[in-house]
């Protein structure tokens, strides 16, 4: 069969994302590659071609290279998780996919999970291959990798990256559990270094790896409201099996699907079995979905500092004019950063965003802009599950955002740890602002001051 044509979608920030479409079935399936990829070189791997062809026998399959890798635009700035969600959205827009089964392979799961939580109306269902929402070890995430081990492994990968003469060694290093077996396959040992060389430069390998090591998308899992499944293989090490079970437990109603074999990726091993399991899962999803009332969003609260004193000093008329000017500036910046105004009470704004990075930058821009009016604002940010209540956004995430905003100092942007974790690699910097009690919210919360 002929290989699919590579086309390009353009994101809102004018980045060209390479994508391919295979098949014309009634169900759309987007396969999110792990780490780095190269759309055309992946077709040189026989097991990958069998996997995609099998999926395309009943679905329209969409694959793409994330920004910074493969055939998509290479960039001078680090690609954030938020930006790569925009890549996926742009591709789905380009192919006219209104509702898609999103399959996240390995660490592609972070992007897949975030997309499903943020855009439930566009997600038919979610399949995660093992998990892939965090790489670093933490006290509450014992399946992750310790930092010293990560640095050792990265140094070795850097040395071997794309070296055609050391293909077998590269395979052993990349696929720790099954590397010895794969290294004996001359086709695979020849293919992997070529893929690495063309998918990303060694410097990009280091930069992407460090961004991924600092990314934590666990907070998206409880907010996922679409039918979901976590796939694992029976031959995996126990730590990977436990990680898959934990991931499924965090997603409301998610199921665990166990497959034969011990291979790391969905396109290795018995790919016919993997494709069939995805097909069965798609078949369990009802054609008509009830409207989803909850999405993952970043909430922003702002208000003018010392508004009562300023209003008394200026008088009603002058104060009203000042507030109107403030509102014009805030609304212009909300539009620029794709924020959705939810409510305005006096001199304060409540808005939601589909990406935490945009929300932070919008808050910073508002703080700078209103300075020309001789006023200061305070801003609070939190990313969490937002519910639709009587047509408006509500829920505990909204309460948390409001409480954080109330603790901010003049011209200060305060954010929750969730916002900080989800903006890794964005260039935003945060300073620890300590632990705080948030009225009406359980536990103590560690907050961060945006300093960039």
Image (cartoon, rainbow, N blue to C red):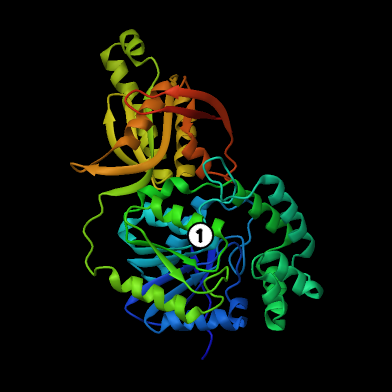
Residue at 31% across / 16% down in the picture? 318
Q: Position of residue 116 (x, y in %)?
A: 38, 57
Q: In the image, is 355 to the left or to the right of 343?
A: right
Residue 347 vs residue 189, the one in the foreground:
189
Q: Residue furthest bottom?
A: 1
**Furthest residue in direction right, as rendered:** 165
Identify which residue is drawn at 56% across, 27% down: 432
Q: Residue furthest top?
A: 313
- Foreground of the two, 401 or 68: 401
Give the secondary structure at mark 1.
helix
At 49% from the left edge and 29% from the top edge, which residue is drawn? 446
Query: x%, y% of residue 84?
Result: 51, 56
User: Can residue 142 be seen?
Assistant: yes
**Quarter placement of the C terminus:** top right
The x and y percentages for residue 391 are 20, 43
Q: Which of the pair 155/320 is nearer the observer?
A: 155
Residue 198, image x, y percentages = 68, 70
User: Tag count in the figure?
Assistant: 1
Query: Is 356 drawn above or below residue 363 in the view shown?
Result: below
Crowding around mark 1 (Cα neighbors within 10 Å: few <14, some 14 to 19, many 20+) is many
Identity of the residue drawn at 61% across and 71% down? 38
Q: Which residue is mark 1?
A: 241
Q: Is residue 220 above or below residue 306?
A: below
Asked whether residue 4 appears in the rendered view, the answer is no
Looking at the image, is 409 positioned above or below residue 193? above
């Amino acid at each position: 069969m002929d290989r699919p044509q590579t086309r390009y979608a353009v994101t809102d920030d004018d980045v060209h994302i390479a994508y391919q479409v295979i098949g014309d079935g009634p169900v759309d399936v987007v396969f999110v590659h792990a780490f780095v990829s190269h759309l055309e070189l992946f077709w040189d791997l026989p097991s990958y071609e069998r996997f995609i062809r099998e999926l395309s026998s009943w679905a329209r399959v969409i694959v793409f290279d994330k920004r910074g890798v493969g055939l998509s635009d290479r960039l001078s700035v680090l690609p954030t998780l938020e930006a790569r969600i925009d890549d996926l959205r742009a591709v789905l827009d380009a192919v006219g996919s209104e509702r898609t089964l999103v399959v996240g392979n390995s660490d592609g799961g972070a992007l897949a999970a975030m997309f499903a939580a943020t855009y439930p109306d566009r997600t038919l269902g979610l399949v995660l291959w093992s998990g892939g929402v965090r790489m670093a070890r933490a006290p509450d995430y014992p399946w992750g990798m310790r930092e010293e081990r990560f640095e050792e492994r990265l140094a070795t990968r850097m040395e071997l990256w794309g070296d055609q003469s050391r293909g077998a060694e590269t395979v052993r290093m990349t696929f720790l559990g099954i590397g010895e077996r794969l290294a004996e396959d001359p086709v695979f040992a020849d293919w992997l270094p070529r893929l690495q060389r063309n998918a990303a430069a060694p410097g990009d390998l280091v930069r992407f790896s460090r961004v991924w090591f600092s990314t934590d998308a666990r907070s998206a899992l409880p907010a996922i409201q679409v039918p979901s499944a976590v796939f694992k293989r029976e031959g995996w090490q126990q730590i990977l099996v436990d990680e898959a079970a934990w991931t499924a437990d965090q997603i409301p109603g998610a199921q665990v699907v166990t497959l034969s074999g011990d291979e790391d990726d969905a396109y290795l091993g018995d790919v016919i079995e993997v494709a069939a399991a995805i097909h069965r899962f798609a078949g369990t999803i009802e054609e008509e979905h009830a409207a989803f009332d909850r999405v993952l969003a970043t909430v922003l609260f702002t208000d003018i500092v010392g508004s009562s004193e300023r209003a008394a000093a200026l008088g009603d008329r002058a104060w009203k004019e000042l507030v109107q000017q403030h509102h014009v500036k805030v609304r212009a910046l909300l539009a620029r950063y794709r924020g959705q105004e939810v409510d305005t009470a006096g001199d304060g704004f409540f808005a939601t965003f589909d990406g935490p990075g945009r929300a932070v930058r919008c808050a910073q821009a508002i703080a700078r802009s209103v300075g020309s009016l001789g006023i200061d604002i305070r801003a609070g940010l939190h990313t969490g599950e937002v519910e639709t209540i009587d047509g408006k956004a509500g829920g505990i995430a909204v309460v948390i955002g409001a409480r954080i905003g109330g603790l901010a100092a003049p011209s200060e942007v305060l954010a929750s740890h969730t916002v900080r974790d989800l903006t890794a690699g964005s260039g935003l910097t945060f300073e620890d602002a300590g632990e705080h009690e948030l009225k009406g919210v359980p536990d103590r919360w560690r907050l961060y001051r945006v300093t960039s």
